[in-house]
Image: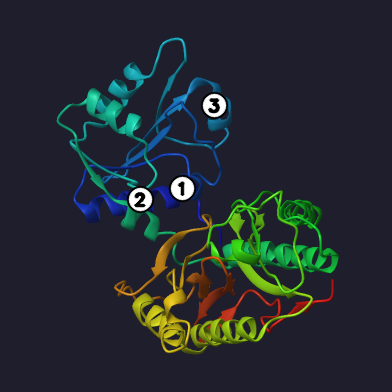
Amino acid sequence: MTQTLAARLAEYAGIAADLGVGAVALVPGANFTRALGQAFASHERPFLLVITADGRTAALVPNLELQSWNLLGFAGQVFDWRDQDGYDTAFAGLIAHLGIRSLAVEGQVMRVFVHHALRKAQPGLEIIDGEAAISGLRVIKTPDEIAAMKAAIGISERALERVLAGVRLGQTEKDIEQSLILALFAEGSEAHAFAPIVAAGDNSALPHAKARADYHVKAGDALLLDFGATKHGFAADITRTVFLGHASDEGRRVYDTVLRANRKGHEITRPGITAHEIDDAVTGVLEASDFADRIRTRTGHGLGRSTHEAPYIIRGNHTPLLTGTVFTNEPGLYQEGNFGVRIEDDILITDKGCISLTSYPTELQVLKC
């Protein structure tokens, strides 16, 4: 059953109480969208939703967004402001109305100028980073959210199949990137979960490479594609690495090592396992290989409304992962000046273990192009 706006806002009141602060403040982004059930853009105009520990609500809303805001059925006090007048009076009114002395904010999202405006409105206001608790509400996915992610993943996999069927030697990375972008929208993506990564040859050794317009793919290249569609506000995040024409013995050995690490992540994941345990096992496969010096990244990260969100699958994170958590399992090996391989699946923890929401084959693929 879909929660009401009041019920969702009550959850943030509970977080404020748990953190021992007067209120929680949200700004446009994934948590804001989750709370309100509608997305609003983040731009130069401050936009703020505040929920107090005792359940009162208020919002600071740019006047040009007021009509859209009024469609939400928000019951709290609204302080709107116009560009011509500035926002200081609205901040002062909001803080005075709520009478709070402390506030938890999204440390990874709130911008400095909003922080300063809050402090200007009430110089003694205590502001703490409540990111972990606030974003923690998004970790366990509902059935509707999982369905949205499955739809985004399906779009992504169909787009990948289209693109790989059309890859030809002599194309540039930019040519392939453009084909991928068009295929994602043709298959029904609402937007890109992030800027797609299309990297061949030595560029594939850069985990966050940019597609080149002056590099023409050639036989023997590794071609790495990391991308994702979005559907109903939820993201997919998939990586596959293929070889063009033929794969060298080294390429096959590296690929096999990464694939074994990826499969280890599938094998051990179950409710209650920690992020540390997953990364330790997956990275351990890479460390035990002949290519340990090519490790550059952790195993993965949470996935949902944001492409990167909690939990982060890394050693030292002893957070138990519960049923309904979705995370990426994306081991990789990268040698600068040579090539890189990454294989990424989106994993859902279930009552009985886990399932891969991604189904595109992970076996070594050599394209006849």
Disc 1 marks which residue? 35
Label 3 neighbour load within 10 Å: few <14, some 14-19, many 20+: some
**Image side of residue 246 versus residue 284, left or right:** right
Residue 3 horizontal side relative to residue 201, left or right: left
The residue lying furthest to the left in this view is 124
Left or right relative to 178: residue 2:
left
Please report contact status of discs 1 and 2: CB closer than 8 Å, yes or no: yes
Tell me which amino acid carries mark 1. Answer: Ala
Q: Quadrant of the C terminus?
A: bottom right
Spot the residue most to the front. Answer: 337
Amino acid found under the numbered disc labelled 2: Tyr
Query: Dot 3 corresponds to which residue?
Result: 65
Q: Nearer the viewer, residue 273 or 223?
A: 223
155 vs 66, nearest the viewer: 155
Q: Quadrant of residue 78?
A: top left
Q: Which mark is residue 12?
A: 2
Point 31% across, 26% down: residue = 94
